[in-house]
Amino acid sequence: TAALAGCAGGGGVGRSGSTVYDLARSGGLDAFLRAADAAGLTATLRGEPQITVFAPNDRAFAVAGRGMLRSDDLQLRMAYHIVPGAFGPSSFTGRDVNYTTAAGASVEVDGSGDTITVGGARVIGEPREARNGYLYVIDRVLTP
């Protein structure tokens, strides 16, 4: 989480009183929140640095298996779902760009087609804006 301190990029958000964590909780992303907590990333999701989060839905975690929560590389795997900076949908529309994640690895975000994909995972529904960034729900767990 120290890598996220003071991150900017993509502009400030601040329109909603909710954090990315709050949006994930109200969106029923229970498995994602459990994994984030186990990885020590809850404070990041609730914090002030601007972030863009690509959160796998519960079905994606079911497919990934329960062993993922006990994985030695859980923090790295979960940090790979977070990009420092607040990037709304217009940041991706018509573009195929690589972003550096909080894990330090690059992830491809492709908005050049009809849907946005992140590392091959499809964004489901509309992104949600929080005071500390954006939340996108995706259909599978990403692997760095």
Image (tube, helix red, strand yellow):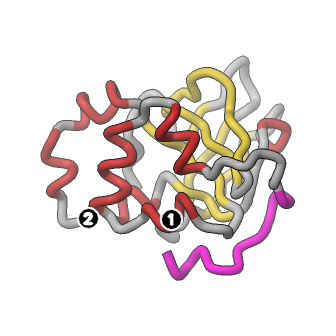
Is residue 34 toward the left or the right of residue 115 in the image? Answer: left
Residue mark closest to the camera, 1 vs 2 = 2
Amino acid type of the residue that numbered disc 2 sits on in the rendered structure: Asp
Is residue 78 toward the left or the right of residue 18 in the image? Answer: left
Which residues make up the magenta segment? 1-12
Q: What residue is drawn where x is 52% and y is 81%?
A: 2
Amino acid type of the residue that numbered disc 1 sits on in the rendered structure: Ala
| Position in image of residue 7 (x %, y %) | 70, 74
Q: What residue is drawn where x is 61% and y is 58%?
A: 83
Q: Which quadrant of the figure contains the C terminus?
A: bottom left
| Position in image of residue 131 (x %, y %) | 74, 53
Q: Nearer the viewer, residue 143 or 65?
A: 65
Q: Quadrant of residue 42?
A: bottom left
| Position in image of residue 24 (x %, y %) | 51, 40
Q: Secondary structure at mark 1?
A: loop
Disc 1: which residue: 105
Gap between marks 1 and 2 measured at Cα: 14 Å
Give yes or no for residue 2 being in the magenta stretch. yes
Q: Nearer the viewer, residue 74 or 119?
A: 74
| Position in image of residue 88 (x %, y %) | 78, 43
For residue 73, the mark is: 2
Furthest residue toward top: 114
Callout 2 crowding tier (Cα within 10 Å): few <14, some 14–19, many ≥20: few
Q: Main secondary structure of the magenta part?
A: loop
Q: Secondary structure at mark 2?
A: loop
